[in-house]
Structures are given as structure tokens and as C-alpha cells.
Image (tube, rainbow, N blue to C red):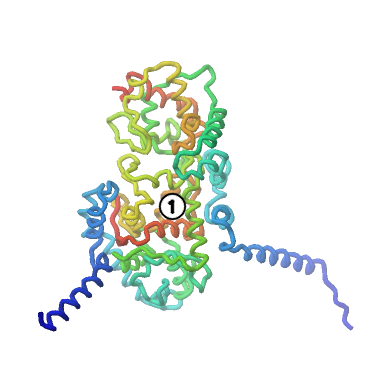
Amino acid sequence: MKKLTLSVSSFAALALSLTMANTAFAESQVDYTKMSSKDLAEHLLFKTNSFKIDQPVQEGGTAGARLVQDEMQKLCTEFRGKRPDPETAAKVSKMARESIRYPEGGIKLGDWKIGRELAWSGFGYRVGHRNDDHSKAANGPGGNCYNCHQLATDRTGGNLGPSLTGYGKLRGNSEAIQKYTYDVIYNPHSLFACTNMPRIGANGVLTQEQISHIMAYLLDPESPVNK
Amino acid sequence: MSVRTYVLLLSALALGSAQASSEFADMAPEEILDRLIEDSSSAYLSQSPQNRQMMPDNPAYWVAEEGEELFSTPRGPNNVSLEGCDFGKGPGVLEGAYVELPRYFEDTGKVMDLETRLVHCMTTLQGFDKKDPAVKKRHGSGSDMMKLQTYIAMQSNGMEWNPPMDHPMEKAMRDAGEEIFYRRSGPMDFSCQTCHGTTGQRIRASVLPNINEPHEWTKAISWPAERAGHQNVRSTQHRVRGCLWQMRHPGIVAGSDASIALISYWTDAARGQPAILPDLKR
């Protein structure tokens, strides 16, 4: 009778093919119809090569991180744009207030002329088929405020957010108003839980310096917003 | 009255009611839009009198004409036309096929939209390689893909969006798409709902469609459409890609399951409304 021997390399090949078969078996067992819609959504986002999750992004790291939800995003997703219940609202607002980082030396108003450009600019953080190169932006990526807000009347703003025309004229320039304005821009959930507005400061969309220029655009009596 | 008059009246009534169910199918895209505006007074639908004016001369018609020729031309290594391609209603049946997509296909075991189905037929029936420009180039009026998509979609103009929901896969994908639609993430904390959940919302000067308003949403999803500002006909997948780009989400892969799930949900949201194909947008 012939002795059946396995060489080391063919044993390794066999082990590898068994592992791969196992993986393929496991993957073919992913039955979309047996998953909850939430589980399937997460699976589609992360496990089906549906997104370019390995693409490098401007803030460092890879694009996949942008799909991972943090606590606020998970909580607020449930309300689908409607007002959250008071308990969730309180939780979200508290988290938001704790996230706010004030500038060294206190809140100061910057240059409204730079703020005007930053409020108008929708440049920055876009990835995928075309990546925004931040080194090309003289004042850094923009805040895109005009997308959602009407500000000065010489340009057209959106109405997803309230009009900010005459913002400083109506409110004055006090320390309290400056702090309020900074808080809303840095993390609007501190005052409006589950708002549609992005966490401009907390998410790192704008730096503290850039926020100071936006604040000047809003509060400086010389700014076109207040003329 | 005489029997002849009575019979004529009856047949006129029957014809009338048959026409009522397909009234939009006999209308040009701009006439469908006019009716929708009449019925809704929607700021979204009526925001561009200029675009409405251009619709009879939509450049997409030229693109569709080229698509018609491509469709029936034997092409690829196998030298066959696309007339053997099943878009869901049988091989070569185009009338009403687009408004019943995305749908589940037995031969692939997947829910597919028009673009993925076209890629499937071009590679399996016609034998093109996935990397062949004819298949790979998805965007631009000069691409085979846009010519074919525009032509095929046009055969569903005026018909009601009616993606099937009988197969469990169809329901699963649609429901996952709904989760994705409302899911907030990324540096701007956006979900699709952020912009598309309320009537009359405007980004700068552009009024946005509300997914909860079917007469708005049917125009919103009527792709392929000429993008006036791009001077190109654009596809549904192009729109998905563009949205995610502006939302600061990662780039989506064309024809991916996540894209199909989203398209499945948003087509279901327009169910029953007449499609406007080809459309003309800003």
C-alpha cells in the first residue's frame, strides 16, 4: 500500500484554502433579509466596499472614520429632524457644553473682512472623486455659513437656518452675547439639542481663529451684516 | 338615444378612463411638470422658469437618440446587441422598465438599479471587460453609459414609480436605505434628511425637494437629466455621488450595495407619482 505523505508546503496550501473557504462560507452566510434594517445599514456602510473608506482625509486618518457615529449623532439620528424628548435634549446639551473649548486669553473678535470670505466659502473637507486641497485656501477651509443662513444682504443665503441679517445690530456686543455666539458656532447643541447645524468648532471645521473672524462678521458694527 | 350612440358613448367612457390611468404617459416632460406645479404650488418645482422654458429643447434628447442606436447595435467581443438584456420586464422590454427599478434579479441574486443592470448585460451578454471604457466610463453625455441610460429611462416617461417590494431582498434593501437616509455622521453631522426633510428649504438660492412630498420627490429622482450648469446629462448614481461629496461623507462606489439601498428607498418614496424623463435641472 502506498504511504500517503503530505509535504509541509502542500499542508500549508491546504490549511490556507480551508481558511479561505471558511471565510467565503462565513461571508456567503450574510443574509441581508435576516438582518435588522439598522444592522444591514451598518453592514452596507462598512463591510461591502460601498465606500472609499481607506481614502486619506484632510483632518488625518481615513474616510471610514467619518462614517462612525459618535454619541450625539447616534442619539439625534433617532428623531429624524424632529425635536428630541426633554431627557435626550438635556443629555445632548450637557455633552455639547462640556465639549466647548474657549480661546487662550478669552473670546476676541477678529477681522470681519476675513469672516465675510469664510462665511461665503463652501470649500473644504470634501473627499471622494475630488479632494479639497486645504493648502489652496488662503484663509483655510470655509464655514459655508451662507449655505443655510442669510447674512449680509449683498449675497444670497439659504433658509435652512434662521436669518442672521443685522445679528450684531439687534443684540449688541456684550461679553454675554459674544459668549453665546461662540457657543452656538462651536457646538450649537449646547443650546439647540439635535440641531441640524454642524458642530463647527467641536468637529474641527473651523479653528478658533477662524471663528473669531466669523464672529466679527456677525458682531462688528462695521460689518455689512449690521449695515 | 339610438343603440349606436349608446355604444359609442360607452366606448368613449371606457377609452376615457383607460386614458386617465396613463394620462401622464402621453405628456411631454414639461407638461408633466406643469401639472405637478398646478397640483401643488411647490416652490421647489417652480423655482426655474428658465429651465422649464428649455425643456422642449432638452439636449438629453440628442443623447437618448444616440443611446437608441447603441442599444440595437451588435457590440462587444460577443457581437450582440442589448436587445437580449432583461431589465426586469423580460429581455428587451423597455417600456415601463425604468420605473420598476431597482428590483431583485434572480440571475444575479441582487437588487440592481439601471446602471448596475446595464453593466451586467454589457459584460455578460456583450462580453465587454469591466475595465473597457464602454463600461467603465459612467459620466458625461459622451459616454455610452449615459446615452444608453437616457434612452432606456425615457421609455418610462410619465409612468408611475413602482419599484417592486415583493421579494424579501427588495424590502431589506429599501429599509436599509431608509436607515442610511436618516443617519447623521461626518464632520458636518449631516444626514440626507438635514436638507431633504422639510418643504421650501433652500441652500443659498436653490430650493430643495422634500422626500415627504411625493410631487416634489418625483422630479428630484427623475434622472437621467440634463444638468444645465454642467452641460452634461447626469445619472442617478452621479447625483448620489454629488450629494455625499457635499455632505463631506466618504466617496461612494458606483453601483455599490449601499448606493442601491439608498436609491431603492428614494424611489419607493416617489411611488405613484409620474416620472419626468429626461428631466432638465440646474
Side of A104 where A220 appears, left or right: left
Q: As rendered, which of B211 and A138 lies closer to the eye?
A: B211
* Residue A66 in the image: above or below residue B26: above
Which quadrant of the figure has residue B160?
bottom left
Residue A99 in sight from this viewpoint:
yes
Which quadrant of the figure has residue B264?
bottom left
Side of B36 where A61 appears, left or right: right
What is the tally of numbered marks visible in this picture? 1
Residue located farthest toward the front when viewing the structure as drawn: B1
Look at the numbered disc 1 and give the secondary structure of its residue: helix
Residue B40 at x, y = what percent? 26, 51
Residue A203 in sight from this viewpoint:
no
* Residue A47 in the image: above or below residue B74: above
* Residue B276 in the image: above or below residue A151: below
Residue B239 at x, y = what percent? 39, 53
* Residue B227 in the image: above or below residue A56: below
Amino acid at the residue labelled 1 = Arg
Which image quarter holds the N terminus of chain B? bottom left
Residue B228 at x, y = what percent? 28, 52
Residue A94 at x, y = what percent? 55, 30
Q: What chain does badge 1 belong to?
A: B
Question: How many C-alpha atoms fall within 10 Å of the one at disc 1: few (<14), some, or many (≥20)?
Answer: many
Q: As rendered, which of B144 and A39 lies closer to the eye?
A: A39
Q: As rendered, which of A218 and B103 lies closer to the eye?
A: B103
Q: Residue at x 45, y 67 (%)?
A: B103
Which quadrant of the figure has residue B54?
bottom left
Q: Which residue is mark 1?
A: B241
